[in-house]
Image (cartoon, grey):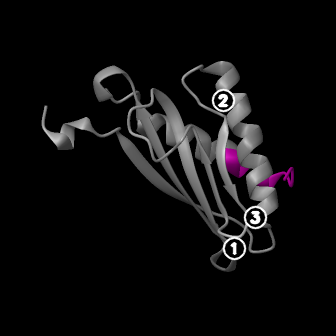
Amino acid sequence: MREAAMRAPKTNAVLEVAPSIGTGAVFVCAERQLQMLAKDNNLWIPEVTRRDSAAATLETGHYEDDNVTGFRIRLHHRAAAGKVDVELKGAGAYFIDLGVDTAIADFRRELSRCLDRGNG
């Protein structure tokens, strides 16, 4: 296989949030929503493997590794801009796309709902 074909399928999205929402609240909502998504779909990897408050970055499922099956995220909160950048990888066996576009839409929707309710 060519090296380009040996990468986990991924996509990204940007979520607009109120500038008053802190990074801690974003992390709490993200972790809560990942747990809920994982209950309904065991392809979600809710295990946080990087939580860097200073860098405002949260990662699940050893995000940097390519040879991991399931959905995992890298989230970066740009508080001053009122934005949350989300990258999502979703690979199955032989790097088959598990549906990254649908998965990121689901995560984005649930994270937005949580933050809108002030549940962070």
- Residue type of the residue flagged with mark 1: Ala
Residue 108's spot in the image, x, y percent?
A: 60, 47
Residue 53's spot in the image, x, y percent?
A: 73, 64
Left or right, 62 with reference to 5: right
- Residue type of the residue flagged with mark 3: Thr
Front residue of 16/65: it is 65
In the picture of the structure, the residue carrying the numbered disc 2 is 37
Evaluate if marks 3 and 1 touch, with contact meaning CB atoms under 8 Å apart.
yes
Gap between marks 3 and 2 measured at Cα? 21 Å
In the picture of the structure, the residue carrying the numbered disc 1 is 79
Evaluate if marks 2 and 1 touch, with contact meaning CB atoms under 8 Å apart.
no
Front residue of 95/50: it is 50
Write the residue at 55% across / 45% down. Answer: 73
Left or right, 109 with reference to 65: right
Q: Is residue 36 magenta?
A: no
Front residue of 56/12: it is 56
Left or right, 91 with reference to 22: left
Gap between marks 2 and 1 measured at Cα? 25 Å
Lower sequence index among marks 2 and 1: 2
Residue 91, numbered label: none
Write the residue at 20% across / 37% down. Answer: 5
Write the start and end of the magenta stretch as one range: 111-120
Lower sequence index among marks 3 and 1: 3
Give the vertical position of 20 relative to 117 (above or below): below
Write the residue at 74% across / 57% down. Answer: 26
- Residue type of the residue flagged with mark 2: Leu
The reply to whether residue 14 is visible in this rendering is yes
Gap between marks 3 and 1 measured at Cα? 7 Å
Residue 93's spot in the image, x, y percent?
A: 34, 20
Give the vertical position of 104 relative to 112 (above or below): above
In the picture of the structure, the residue carrying the numbered disc 3 is 23
